[in-house]
Image (tube, rainbow, N blue to C red):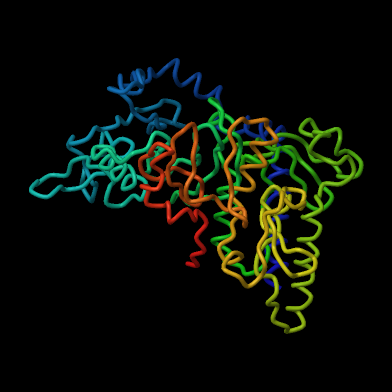
């Protein structure tokens, strides 16, 4: 019963968004009957001169920067500037009777009373942010000479959260959530990857799974392989184009069987002309229907222990072989990747993540010259060598610690007697 509710809410939400897009023209026509129109603001600004924005909002550089907000003028026709304060500058935490602040602490800072001070000042978010704590640890390790040449400093946003993209130079970039945990979305590393790869859809899908906390498969908006929104979204038999970064509708509705190919976002290389669902999505929906049927009959469904599909509708990287004897690393179509596999109920299977196998295939398909070597279960080997230098890596393939010449690799902490694939079950 729970599954049916989830499906209904998702369908209703997307259809409502689509209807909003369809009626946008009518809404603009209705807006002319209200006072707060652009024509009203043009007239207001002609007879009431707006205050000039502060230099902080007009310059927007490393020294002067701020945020533009609507001002307390009729219909917010004018704008006001709230300046970003810098580290150590006086600030206000607000309160009853306090004046409206003219500035707020800038990105990475928050207003607090530091030890030994009487008045609040802008201080780093180190105590409350995982990302800034990680940055501080990185900077300390760099001062101690413990940072390798491929290690990247954590990148934080203005709220102290991790930026959505992490990259391994010369290999791949992948999406992370606000806490820096790896989520769906991966692409070959390029100089301009951050322009197209922002992971908005992937982050939304990860949040949905966390909030729903369901032991069963969950339906979310479809993403593309880089974690952005697939520009074609369908619910049941109705489809619409959406913005790849916001997910907002950008076209009229079309019927999936009669007008799908006429949508401007339709791509015959990615989408079928008469159907929207991919093979894995069909299997997933069949699972959800089975679960709904069983639960309505007061049965407890236990065998669906994980989602077999990725947020892009293709198969997840770990799949169970039909014989049931082992699981294997799969490409997006569900086909095995080389010979990466693990017998069930073994430490090899318990630690299996296939992150290396997927990255290796991605790099080989793009004709990359340097590809990682993987463990038998498709995980990254704990020790990697590249251009005569060897170094330790974590489960995502990122370098950890300093590198050593290949002839001295036995001095690395991950050497482990030459066994780079230890079977440690967490």
Q: Residue at x 36, y 28 (%)?
A: 80
Q: Residue at x 49, y 19 (%)?
A: 43
Place of residue 125 in the rendered image (x, y in percent of width and height, measured from the top left): 28, 46
Q: Residue at x 43, y 46 (%)?
A: 392
- Residue nearest the viewer, comparing 60 with 342: 342
The residue positioned farthest toward the top in the image shown? 46
- Residue nearest the viewer, comparing 302 with 41: 302
Q: Is residue 368 above or below residue 202?
A: above
**Count of numbered circles in the view:** 0
375 on left or right of 142: right
Place of residue 119 in the rendered image (x, y in percent of width and height, measured from the top left): 12, 44
Q: Quadrant of residue 99?
A: top left
Place of residue 315 in the rendered image (x, y in percent of width and height, measured from the top left): 73, 53
The residue positioned farthest toward the front in the image shown? 407
173 on left or right of 310: left
Q: Is residue 148 above or below residue 6?
A: above
Place of residue 116 in the rendered image (x, y in percent of width and height, measured from the top left): 7, 48
Name the quadrant of the N terminus: bottom right
- Residue nearest the viewer, comparing 254 with 109: 109
Q: Residue at x 79, y 71 (%)?
A: 290
297 on left or right of 32: right
- Residue nearest the viewer, comparing 71 with 289: 289
110 on left or right of 229: left
The residue positioned farthest toward the bottom in the image shown? 298
Q: Quadrant of residue 416?
A: bottom left
């Amino acid at each position: 019963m729970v599954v049916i509710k989830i499906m209904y809410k998702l369908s209703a939400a997307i259809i409502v968004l689509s209807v909003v897009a369809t009626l946008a023209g009518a809404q603009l026509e209705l807006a002319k009957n209200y006072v707060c129109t652009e024509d009203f603001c043009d007239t207001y600004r002609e007879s009431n001169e707006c205050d000039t924005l502060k230099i902080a909002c007009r310059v927007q550089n490393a020294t002067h920067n701020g945020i533009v907000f609507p001002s307390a003028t009729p219909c917010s026709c004018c704008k006001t500037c709230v300046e970003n304060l810098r580290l150590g500058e006086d600030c206000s935490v607000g309160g009853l009777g306090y004046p409206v602040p003219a500035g707020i602490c800038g990105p990475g800072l928050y207003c607090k009373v530091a030890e030994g001070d009487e008045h609040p000042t802008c201080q780093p978010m180190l105590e409350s942010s995982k990302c800034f704590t990680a940055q501080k640890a990185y900077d300390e390790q760099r001062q101690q000479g413990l940072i390798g040449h491929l290690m990247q400093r954590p990148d934080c946003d203005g709220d102290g959260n991790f930026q959505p993209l992490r990259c391994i130079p010369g290999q791949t970039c992948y999406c992370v959530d606000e806490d820096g945990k790896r989520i769906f979305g991966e692409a070959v590393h390029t100089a301009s990857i951050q322009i197209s790869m922002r992971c908005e859809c992937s982050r939304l899908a990860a949040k949905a799974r966390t909030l729903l906390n369901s032991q069963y498969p969950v339906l979310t908006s479809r993403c593309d392989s880089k974690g952005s929104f697939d520009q074609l979204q369908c619910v049941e038999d109705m489809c619409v184009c959406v913005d790849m970064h916001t997910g907002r509708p950008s076209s009229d509705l079309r019927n999936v069987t009669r007008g799908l190919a006429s949508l401007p976002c339709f791509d015959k290389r990615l989408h079928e002309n008469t159907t929207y669902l991919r093979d894995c999505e069909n299997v997933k929906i069949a699972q959800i229907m089975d679960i709904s049927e069983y639960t309505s009959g007061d049965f407890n469904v236990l065998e669906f222990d994980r989602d077999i599909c990725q947020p892009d509708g293709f198969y997840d990287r770990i799949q169970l072989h039909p014989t049931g004897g082992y699981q294997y690393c799969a490409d997006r179509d569900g086909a095995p990747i080389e010979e990466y596999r693990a017998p069930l109920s073994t430490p090899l299977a318990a630690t299996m993540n296939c992150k290396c196998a997927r990255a290796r295939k991605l790099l080989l398909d793009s004709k990359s010259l340097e590809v990682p070597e993987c463990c038998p279960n498709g995980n990254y080997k704990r020790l990697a060598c590249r251009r005569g230098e060897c170094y330790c890596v974590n489960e995502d393939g990122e370098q950890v610690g300093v590198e050593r010449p290949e002839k001295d690799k036995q001095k690395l902490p991950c050497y482990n007697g030459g066994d780079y694939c230890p079977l440690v079950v967490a």
